[in-house]
Amino acid sequence: MQWDMNIDICALILLLVVLLIHVSKQFVSIRRSRVFLAMVLLETAAVVCSTTIKYLLLYAGYEAGLWSAVLVNVFYVVQYLVPILYMDYMVVWSGHSLKASRLSSCLFALPIVFYLAIMIWNIVTQRLYIWDSQFGYKHAAPAGSLLVITLYCIMYGVIYAVLNVRKLAFGKLSTICLSAAGVIIVMLVQHYCPGVTHINFIVSAGMLVLYLVAQNQSEMIDNNTQVLNRNMLDELLRDNISNRKRFDLIVLALDDFKFVNKTFGVTSGDMMLMQVAHFLTTITKKAKVYRYGADQFALEILHGDMNLDQIIALIQERFRHPWITEDVSVMLSTTISCVSYPDDGANMANIIDVIDYSVLSAKTSGKGAVVYARDLDLHALRKEKAIEKAVEDAILRDTIEVYYQPIYNTKKQCYTSAEALVRLRDDMLGNIPPDVFIPIAERNGTIVKLGALIFEKVCQFIQKVNLRETSIEYIEVNVSVVQCMQQDFVEKLIGIMERYDVAPDQINLEVTETAASNSLAILQENIERLHAKGISFSLDDYGSGYSTLGYIHQLPFKIIKLDRLMVWDAFANERAGITLKFTVGMLKELKVHIVAEGVETQEQQTHLADIGCDYLQGWYYAKAMPANEFEALIKEAS
Ligand code: C2E
Ligand code: CA
Ligand code: CA
């Protein structure tokens, strides 16, 4: 068997095609793209070197000499850099920095050290190859070590990507694994059967696959506006941050863009967005432009490259003029937020949070507002993020606790119900009060999981203590409006109750006034469905600010809980005392039960019972206590 030049020429053509599409589309200069480009260039150089030597020796009648030795050495140097770059590419692609693990970094450095040692040794001894009449030159026995390095690099790259999978879809990952396996198999076959010379072609095909699966530039660009997309922003910022490159980010959030879409149609809206994107690309060549959200753009500028105030002035000037498409002319306005790394955030997650927080602050400041993150109270944001994490950790580690505060029945003169109150203790932050972390969990949506967990713990408790055997008739559980808005809210609660054999009359759900005022329609539907199943409801914090008589009329509340501030006011101020008395009278006419919260003294207790409150809750009786203490209390009483 002899060397077949056609296969190497095909490999070369394939590589040139990949090279051409890679650089002809808008080249996104991120590390991943640069490594890919280097990989294709080196592979092309290697194929050119080896093909030239073989052609000259086998077909053109040249004798092996210094020129061919130089070419073979260049071939070895470039060819075996490719697997090292592949390894690097996979690390970058996986989106997980090597710096996070010392072991990964050492394992990464290992083949590089060996590669350098072997190349230096070969330049001195020329022992990696031997001249051959059929193939021009052949690997000598020591070249086996290069095969080992190559296998190692490919395996490292693939395993690293699999283990650190962040944004890689399963399909992409399996295609990459298959193509890597193909290259490995052909390499082994070629090593043991030198007659098979398809390796260059297979490697080129592997690069094409890698391009299509991982490097596809069209996945980096927003189809509509032709600027870089959000994924790219994340990747580039991560790139900058891992290289400690300072940068500034200007985020534009168009005001009321929904109005443009609604009034002029989505097509005109899209054209406006294209114009804005195009304008931003023309401001300066030094900034990269991204579509950050549906009606948001971001400009990324390496620190010191341009003056931020100058750019902002240019943007503001442009927004003083209309944006014109074929048949529409519209004045747009935009808020502008400026965030700098590392001044405003030390890592990727911080920076993204600060951007979102700044955009929100700009929006609340009004149309056209300009906000610098450095002027915002980032301390509050960081605290909020730390609390978010504490809640998520507690859910994961199941360290959320439910305490119970007994509620005194003034007629029966004993405890007949209790309120379940969540408790959270974090190693770093200590005890976090529920009125601090519940609103945060509501904002980021964790309340749905948290609320279900609390409800489950309450049901578990009811089953465990066999509530029917005690004087406690039902437990009051606080539910947040975000929970009530869930489509499957009713099914979820009923499912949990069935699992623990809890009857509907053993549960009372507390809804707050603010919750009720936000989304009456959905709330009403869910409350009515649960009410139809026999679960009763309380309106919590009555009198804490909102006028809720409308809701009392429309929603089937069984209990109204008077807010503790209203109760306390009644004892501090004569007029407030009269108001409370008449409020209780009015509520009694409406045939609802009344709970007075915040009862702290004997005087309060006597007076509240006298004016007709059915239930009293407060520290005068007991503070909220852990489940086991509450269990002991109610078992002792019964
Ligand atoms: P809330 O629903 O009005 O709960 C009553 C709050 O008043 C509780 O505070 C309770 O410990 C406190 N309290 C009871 N008696 C007295 C008293 O005599 N004096 C004083 N000064 N305070 C008294 P806590 O446990 O800190 O809960 C605060 C708020 O957090 C709750 O107000 C409720 O809005 C929310 N929350 C608590 N647990 C949950 C829960 O499981 N789910 C939801 N969604 N929210 C909860
Ligand atoms: Ca409550
Ligand atoms: Ca309350």
Image (spheres, grey):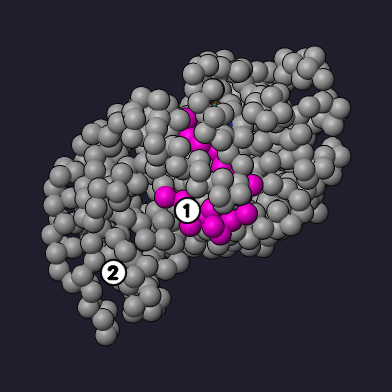
| N-term-proximal mark, 1 vs 2 | 2
| Image vertical order of residue 242 relative to residue 277, above or below | above
For the point 50% across and 47% down, the residue is 586
Whether residue 524 is visible, yes or no, is yes
Question: Quarter of the image containing the C terminus?
Answer: top right
- Residue 403 occupies which quadrant of the picture? top right
Tag 2 residue: 275
Estimate how packed mark 2 is, as few (under 14), some (14 to 19) or many (20 or more) residues with alpha carbons within 10 Å.
Answer: some
User: Observer-nearest residue: 272 or 373?
Assistant: 373
Could you tell whether 102 is left or right of 361 in the image? right
User: Residue 338 placed where, x, y %?
Assistant: 26, 42
Q: Amino acid at mark 2?
A: Gln
Asked if disc 1 and disc 2 are in contact, CB closer than 8 Å, the reply is no
Could you tell whether 106 is left or right of 635 in the image? left
Query: Helix, strand or loop at disc 1?
Result: helix
Whether residue 59 is visible, yes or no, is no
Could you tell whether 327 is left or right of 350 in the image? left
Tag 1 residue: 549
User: Observer-nearest residue: 565 or 480?
Assistant: 565
Question: Quarter of the image containing the N terminus?
Answer: bottom right
| Image vertical order of residue 291 relative to residue 535, above or below | below
Range of residues picked out in magenta: 547-565
- Residue furthest front as drawn: 610
For the point 31% across and 55% down, the residue is 253
Report the label total. Answer: 2
For the point 70% across and 53% down, the residue is 531
Query: Helix, strand or loop at disc 2?
Result: helix
For the point 15% across and 68% down, the residue is 321
Q: Is residue 559 magenta?
A: yes
Alpha carbon of mark 1 to alpha carbon of mark 2: how far? 51 Å
